[in-house]
Image: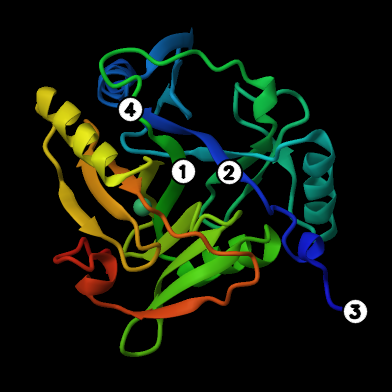
C-alpha cells in the first residue's frame, strides 16, 4: 500500500521557528542582530541571549565562531508533534532531547548526518516579545536555514526519507552529480537547503519579507548601520525569490528575501544546471563548489 501524505511526509506542514548561532563574542553578535534585524535582546543565562522581533527569533550562544548548532520547527499542535515523534521512531531515527530553551517538555530533536540538531516543538508555548530599534516594524519572517556539506547525498536522504521533507529543486553538475538540493516542509519552496562544499558548515539563513519594496527598506536600514550588501540584489532560479545577503560579524551570511515560490506537496522536483545563472538569474553567484 502506498504511504499517504502524512505517512510519507510526517513533518508536513512545519515552519522554521528559531535557530541558534554561536560566537566567540556572543554579546557582540547579539548587538548586531538587535540593531540589524530590529530585535529585542534578553540574556537568558551566562552563555545564551534570546533575540526576538517581528516573526523572527534566534538564540545566540557562546561557542565556535560561525556555528549554527541547531534549528527548530514549529509543528503547530501537540497531536502532530506526537505523530511526528512516532513516525521517526518507526523509522528508527534516534530521538534526542531538544536543545532549545524556547520549547516546552514535549519538544524533541534529531541529529542529521553532519551532527546538526533539528528540534521540533510548539511555538504556542513561546512568549514572543516585540522587537526593538528602527527596523522592528520591517517585515521579515524567519523562513529558511541552509547548510553546506561534504555529505550532500546522505544529508538529502536524511531530510527527504527520514524527516519527510519534499525536494523542490536539484542542481546538477556536468557529471550528473547533485551540487545543491532545496527541500520544503510546507508549500513554501524551501525551509532547508544543502549545498555540496569542501567543508560542512552553516551557509546562511533567510528572512522572508512581503515585497520588493521591503527589500529596498531593509537595504536602506542596513545602510544607516553601514552594513554593506555582500551579494545581490538578485533573483534565485530555485525558489524564484528576490534576495540580497549581508554578513554578520562572524562572516555568517544573512539573507533578506521576497516572492519565494509556492509549491504544493505533490508538485514534482525540478532540475537546474550547476552554473552561476541558476543561483542568480540576474548575474553572478556565490558558488559553494
Ligand atoms: Fe536562501
The residue identified by callout 3 is: 1
Q: Earlier in the sequence, mark 3 or mark 1?
A: 3
Inter-mark Cα distance, 1 to 2 = 7 Å
Front in this rendered view, residue 212 or 229: 212
Provide residue 39's location: percent of width, then percent of height: 37, 19
- Where disc 4 sits, the SS reads loop
Inter-mark Cα distance, 2 to 4 = 20 Å
Disc number at residue 121?
Answer: none
Nearer to us of marks 2 and 4 is 4
The residue identified by callout 4 is: 138
- Where disc 3 sits, the SS reads loop
Residue at the image point whose x is 69% and y is 52% from the top: 11
Nearer to us of marks 4 and 3 is 4
The residue identified by callout 2 is: 15
Inter-mark Cα distance, 4 to 1 = 15 Å
The answer to whether the residue labelled 1 contacts the one labelled 2, judged by CB atoms less than 8 Å apart, is yes
Q: Quadrant for the C terminus, please.
A: bottom left
Which image quadrant is residue 163 in?
A: bottom right
Amino acid at each position: 500500500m502506498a504511504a499517504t501524505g502524512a505517512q510519507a511526509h510526517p513533518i508536513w506542514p512545519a515552519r522554521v521557528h528559531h535557530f541558534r548561532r554561536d560566537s566567540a563574542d556572543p554579546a557582540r553578535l547579539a548587538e548586531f542582530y538587535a540593531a540589524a534585524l530590529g530585535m529585542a535582546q534578553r540574556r537568558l543565562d551566562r552563555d545564551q541571549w534570546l533575540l526576538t522581533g517581528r516573526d523572527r527569533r534566534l538564540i545566540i550562544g557562546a561557542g565556535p565562531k560561525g556555528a549554527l548548532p541547531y534549528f527548530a520547527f514549529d509543528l503547530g499542535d501537540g497531536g502532530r508533534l506526537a505523530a511526528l515523534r512516532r513516525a521517526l521512531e518507526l523509522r528508527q531515527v534516534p530521538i534526542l532531547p531538544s536543545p532549545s530553551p524556547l520549547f516546552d517538555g514535549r519538544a524533541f530533536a534529531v541529529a542529521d548526518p553532519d551532527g546538526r540538531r533539528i528540534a521540533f516543538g510548539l511555538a504556542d508555548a513561546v512568549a514572543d516579545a516585540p522587537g526593538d530599534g528602527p527596523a522592528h516594524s520591517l517585515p521579515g519572517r524567519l523562513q529558511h536555514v541552509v547548510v553546506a556539506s561534504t555529505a550532500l547525498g546522505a544529508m538529502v536522504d536524511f531530510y527527504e526519507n527520514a524527516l519527510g521533507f519534499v525536494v523542490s529543486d536539484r542542481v546538477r553538475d556536468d557529471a550528473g552529480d547533485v551540487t545543491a538540493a532545496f527541500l520544503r516542509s510546507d508549500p513554501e519552496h524551501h525551509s532547508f537547503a544543502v549545498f555540496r562544499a569542501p567543508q560542512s558548515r552553516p551557509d546562511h539563513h533567510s528572512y522572508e519579507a512581503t515585497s520588493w519594496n521591503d527589500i529596498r527598506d531593509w537595504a536602506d536600514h542596513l545602510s544607516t548601520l553601514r552594513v554593506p550588501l555582500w551579494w545581490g540584489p538578485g533573483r534565485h532560479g530555485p525558489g524564484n525569490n528576490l534576495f540580497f545577503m549581508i554578513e554578520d560579524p562572524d562572516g555568517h551570511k544573512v539573507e533578506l528575501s521576497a516572492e519565494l515560490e509556492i509549491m504544493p506537496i505533490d508538485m514534482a522536483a525540478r532540475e537546474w544546471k550547476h552554473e552561476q545563472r541558476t543561483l542568480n538569474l540576474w548575474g553572478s553567484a556565490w558558488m559553494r563548489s
